[in-house]
């Protein structure tokens, strides 16, 4: 056949054992049966596949960056961000983590380093958290933070 792959011949030797070896129980070496005749079988196969190649081709690797996550900050992180914005006088940054009414209340008082505000705690209940800053004289700044998404919804000064 023109264009067909060359024929490959394989000779497979198959040995058939005609007899089984037997042993004598008398211990005198006994006799053994002679092996039977062997037969050779010639097999012919046809292949249309091209010869195997040792060349390996790999697909190009593409690396893609992960998109930035836009997960909401924790309630404490949102309250701390608002407090930090207040210390810098940055109303725009405050507006990114708090509702306008909360920003107005907080910025209604001027932050001064000498006031000595110190973060106390954040405690959560019923879908929101209260984050507290305290200073001498039992004064506090309380920030109510909605938990999902974390956003300061209310600011109070006590007393």
Image (spheres, helix red, strand yellow):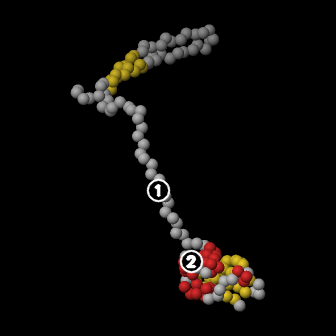
Q: In the orientation shown, which residue stands out farthest toward the bottom?
A: 159
Q: Which secondary structure, mark 1?
A: loop
Residue 152 in the image: state x and y as whole percent: 59, 81
Query: Which residue is painted at 69% across and 89% down in the image?
Result: 158
Q: Which secondary structure, mark 2?
A: helix
Q: Left of 69 or right of it: where is 126?
A: right
The answer to whether residue 151 of the structure is visible from this angle is no
Q: Which quarter of the figure has residue 9?
A: top left
Distance from label 1 to label 2 (Cα)?
31 Å
The answer to whether residue 106 of the structure is visible from this angle is yes
Residue 43 in the image: state x and y as whole percent: 35, 22
Q: Quadrant of the C terminus?
A: bottom right
Q: Quadrant of the N terminus?
A: top left
Residue 103 in the image: state x and y as whole percent: 58, 84
Residue 93 is labelled as 2
Marks 1 and 2, the one that precedes in the sequence: 1
Of the two numbered discs 1 and 2 in the rendering, the one whose residue sits closer to the viewer:
2
Q: Which quarter of the figure has residue 39?
A: top left
Question: Where is mark 1, residue-wise?
Answer: 64
Q: In the orientation shown, which residue stands out farthest toward the left?
A: 2
* Residue 16 or residue 86, whichever sits in front: 86
């Amino acid at each position: 056949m023109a264009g067909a792959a060359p024929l490959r011949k394989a000779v497979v030797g198959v040995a058939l054992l005609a007899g089984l070896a037997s042993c004598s129980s008398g211990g005198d070496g006994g006799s053994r049966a002679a092996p039977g005749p062997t037969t050779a079988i010639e097999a012919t196969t046809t292949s249309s596949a091209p010869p195997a190649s040792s060349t390996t081709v790999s697909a190009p690797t593409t690396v893609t960056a992960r998109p930035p996550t836009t997960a909401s900050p924790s309630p404490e992180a949102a309250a701390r961000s608002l407090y930090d914005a207040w210390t810098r006088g940055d109303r725009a940054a405050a507006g990114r983590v708090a509702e306008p009414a909360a920003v107005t209340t907080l910025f209604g008082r001027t932050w001064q380093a000498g006031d000595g505000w110190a973060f106390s705690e954040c405690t959560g209940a019923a879908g929101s958290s209260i984050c507290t800053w305290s200073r001498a004289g039992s004064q506090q700044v309380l920030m109510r933070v909605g938990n999902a998404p974390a956003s300061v919804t209310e600011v109070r000064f006590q007393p």
